[in-house]
Amino acid sequence: MIPIALQLYTVREDLAQDPVRIIKAVAEIGYQGVEGGTPAGMSNQDYLSLLADNNLILIGSGTSTADLQDNLSQVVEGCSELGINTLMCGIGGELRQSDGDWKRVVAGLAEGCAKASEAGLRILYHNHAFEFEDKVDGQYGLDYLFDTIPETDIQAELDTYWVQVGGEDPVAYINKYAGRLPRLHIKDRAPAPADEEYPFAEVGHGILDWDGIFAAAPAAGVEWYVVEQDRCAHSPLESARMSLEYLRSRDMI
């Protein structure tokens, strides 16, 4: 059975105010792990102690192309302190700064990922929708990135919601990157209300094909499901609870 973590971006505002209460609540809801770096104002050791006290596994954190290229020793040191070797990254900011120069941005990411791989780190790319809006040499940006950077240097952390918003089928993309997909961000999309551009929903409360997604994920080699919800109609903790209750109803935890 694939374990389930919560991406702490879901509860980011509450976490910044009271990390002890929020981490305890995440554990009480029933999550087995979390994804996200040390909360502001807390040491890495205190963060690890807090997670251990609540029987939560830290499955990874985030990084950037600039840090992989220019501050790798600090990145490695931070991972060592946290007992992790897996980091998630994206390139949205870099593309905005480069006026959408995909080839230059991907080349920079490739350089950083190669250094990280040599240092024993595993880098996962987390997509949004823009990777399906831009094309490079006739390919979606996402496919260009994965074709350009070797599998040994970068793997996938597909986000089901953003694949759907990008106009593609999450199940097809899970199958496409089978064997290169250790983490899957599970996030649902509600029917779009008029006042919201990207309507998020709790897992199982929207329009995504969860039967297909959960049939494809084990064969693709997914090691962790990561629940994430960028914006919540309920309180973030309640949304996190609702998502996990749906997964529990499917006997997934």
Image (cartoon, rainbow, N blue to C red):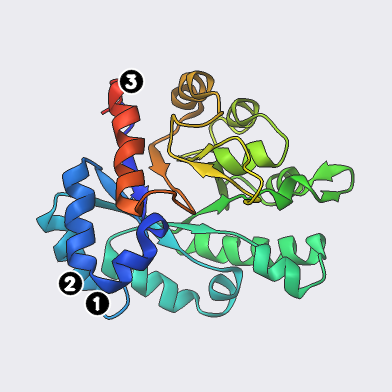
Q: Amino acid at mark 2?
A: Asp
Q: Amino acid at mark 3?
A: Arg
Residue 201 x/y as whole percent: 48, 40
Please tell me which residue lies in front, 14 or 50. Answer: 14
> Is the C-beta separation of discs 1 and 2 under 8 Å?
yes
Residue at 54%, 74% in the rendered image: 67
Which of the two marks, 3 or 1, is nearer to us in this view?
3
According to the picture, the residue beneath numbered tag 2 turns out to be 46
Res 85 visible: no
Quarter-of-image position of residue 1: top left
Residue at 66%, 29% in the rendered image: 169
According to the picture, the residue beneath numbered tag 1 turns out to be 42
Residue at 63%, 40% in the rendered image: 192
| Inter-mark Cα distance, 3 to 2 | 35 Å
- At label 1, counting other C-alpha atoms closer than 10 Å, the crowd grade (few under 14, some 14-19, many 20 or more) is few
According to the picture, the residue beneath numbered tag 3 turns out to be 250
Q: Residue furthest right?
A: 137
Res 126 visible: yes
Residue 71 x/y as whole percent: 51, 79
> Is the C-beta separation of discs 3 and 1 under 8 Å?
no
Q: Amino acid at mark 1?
A: Met
